[in-house]
Image (cartoon, helix red, strand yellow):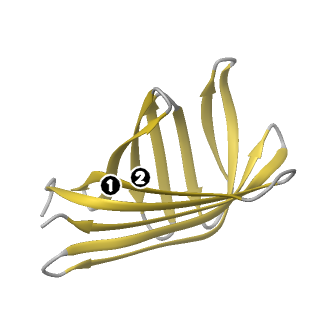
Amino acid sequence: MNNAETKVKIKLNSTILPIDGDKENYEMWLDGSLVKKSGKTYLRYVEQLEEKEIRTTVKMGSEQALILRGGGVKMRLPFNTIQEEIGEYDSQFGSLPIVTKTRHLSYDYKEGQILSGKFNVQYDLILSGQAVGKYTLEIHYSEVQ
């Protein structure tokens, strides 16, 4: 199943606990695709945020992972259970370095009759040396029949 692309339904849950604010929860249902390439698994989907289209690729793993966003939002968010990682966020003021401190990372999948899986990451986001909040992202996907 190398380089095979499988259509999937995605349920995405995101929780943000900002340092100075109220907890925010988001839930989205999206159509996407699962791609296996060079022994790695990628989940791709597009989300609409106001008038912007954001293309997201999640490289899933249980020790290291990466979220790449392009289009309306440009961001590179790396995760590593062993060490802090430096990513970047492109804003109207230019590219800002962001640091992720991964607290938990897991990726489980089943390749039975129906392909399905769950990706979960909990991390602290640090911007300009200041912690801005605690984030949790949980993605469930299953093959479209």
Q: Say if 121 sits above or below 35 in the image.
A: below
What's the CA distance linking mark 1 and mark 2?
5 Å
Q: Is residue 113 left or right of residue 71?
A: left
110 relative position to 52: left or right: left
Q: Position of residue 23 (x, y in %)?
A: 74, 59
Residue depicted at 24% across the width and 60% down the height: 8
Identity of the residue drawn at 12% across and 80% down: 113
Give the camera-side residue of 19 and 43: 19
Q: Which residue is nearer to you in this view: 56 or 13? A: 13
Q: Nearer the viewer, residue 124 or 23?
A: 23
Query: Within 10 angstroms of label 1, few (less than 14), some, or many (20 or more) residues?
Result: some
User: What quarter of the picture does the N terminus occupy?
Assistant: bottom left
- The residue singled out by tag 2 in the image is 58
Residue type at tag 1: Tyr
Residue receiving disc 1? 42
**Residue flagged by tag 2: what amino acid is it?**
Val
Tell me the SS state at disc 1.
Answer: strand
Q: Residue furthest top?
A: 93
- Tell me if residue 141 comes above or below residue 91 in the rendering: below
Q: Is residue 86 left or right of residue 6?
A: right
Q: Are marks 1 and 2 in contact (CB under 8 Å)?
A: yes
Element at label 2 = strand
Give coordinates of residue 128: x percent, y percent. Answer: 81, 37
Q: Residue at x 27, y 79 (%)?
A: 110
Q: Which mark is drawn over residue 19?
A: none
x, y percentage for residue 121?
A: 56, 65
Q: Residue at x 12, y 67 (%)?
A: 145
Residue 91 x %, y %: 63, 24
